[in-house]
Image: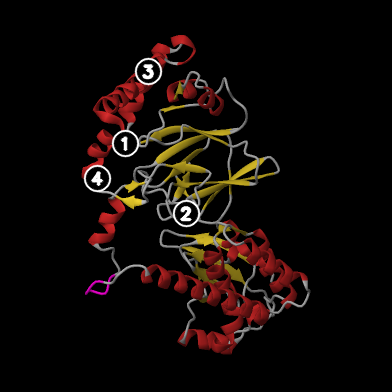
Amino acid sequence: MDTKRFEMQNSLEANYLCVNLKPPFQLDQIVIRVLKENFPEFLVPYQLKIIDDQVSFQYELVNGVALEYSNMILSKDLFIKMYKNLLMPFIEGGDWFLDYHHLCVDPRYIYLNKSKVYFIYVPEESFKSTDQEIISFLKKIFEDVTITDDKDFQIKLYKYFANGNVTLSGLYQLILEEAKAALILDSNKEFIKQKKMPQTQEGKWVKTDKQEEEKKQPVDIAKGEKVLESNNDKIMDVLFGEKKKKDKNKKNKPKVEEKISKKKEGGLGGLFKKKKEKVQVVAEELKGTGAIGTFYKQEEKESGLQPYTEETEIANLEENYLGPYLELVYSEIPGAPAKIELNFQGKFIVIGRVSNNEVRPDIAFPGEFKRIGRRHARIEKKEGEYYLIDLGSVNHTFINGKILVPNQPYHLCHGMEIQFTESKPVRYRVHN
């Protein structure tokens, strides 16, 4: 499919993708009529525009991240959900009188929102993809994914693509079988788990008071029996006598005091004593705020040498310059990274907020930054230049005060100001 004729447009209301048609063109009138009556949820909504003899399709982009920039480190379960949704329009599109060859298979124009997938469909004869192009697209998406918890499944898919006899229906059937097997496995695990636990009258599986009490009771190793906690002192008296029990408590006490004493003195005979005490005070002040005002270099952390503070790091940004970076210039909430290095080794880095249920982003803001998305933006490196891409964030990304159109790369130049989120913003200045 020729995506060179795709143009991005944005307004205050929404972002649009426009596809301009060149005469002579052949519109699929049946599909256009059917889509007016019954529009499938896997397509991006569009309007047919005719202005001064110029005919174009205008697609209102959904709030999501383009497949090109989505997270490709997934569990097997999440991968199967995504891949099944990618395949489904090609298999079931005929129910809407759609020709799947008119689905755009450019990852820049396929959008993910949670587990849902949205395609651009162009009902015009010149916008078509071949079967080989579609298979190559699906193969590449699989090859770009890292499945974290089932390497055997990944090898199985590699073998399927390697045999050269790949069909859309065959691939879809394979994914359905894997999804069914995973569902059965999860059901069996849940059944076994529930089987071990008695059921209450409300139908909820809970542990009984007896089980909890048995769990708390200590075990007599010599007899292999559980004994009551209240008998502990008597047993100690019988085995060791009252005096030895007291000696044991006294013996442990100096060790604790010695450990605390060493911590106060600092490493290397108290050489950094004053610095250490200052750091402990700062760390206590920042406790619970998520701030990173005090931190260690990796080699210093391991050796126990002198820590350095955020103030020292910011003061020496130019002196320790090792390449392009982003410098923090404003943040209402404490804890934002003071410096974001851009001399990374891979093709890109992801900027986002820490979350328990997702892969940690490369640049992770603490959980207090609620307005920053879990995968808010990413910075790419191409031929020595850097580009910022908003990943469909809810609260937006800005360059020099201008809002970015999601999923579009913006060239970063020296002196630019990047802003994450509209309210309670975090601002960085570009140095390169």
Closer to the eye: label 4 or 1: 4
The residue tagged 4 is: 229
Label 3 to label 2: alpha-carbon separation: 42 Å
Mark earlier in primary sequence (2, 4): 4
Question: Where residue 51 sits: x, y (%)?
Answer: 54, 73
Hey, which quadrant is residue 99 in on the image? bottom right
Helix or strand or loop: what does disc 2 sit on?
loop
> For the point 55% across and 59% down, which residue is it?
74
Q: Nearer the viewer, residue 102 or 83?
A: 83
Instruction: Provide the residue span drawn in magenta.
Output: 200-204
Circle on res. 358: 2
Q: Nearer the viewer, residue 257 or 110?
A: 257
Label 4 to label 3: alpha-carbon separation: 31 Å
Instruction: Count how many numbered circles sit on residues in the image.
Output: 4
The residue tagged 1 is: 288
Question: Where residue 129 sits: x, y (%)?
Answer: 70, 75
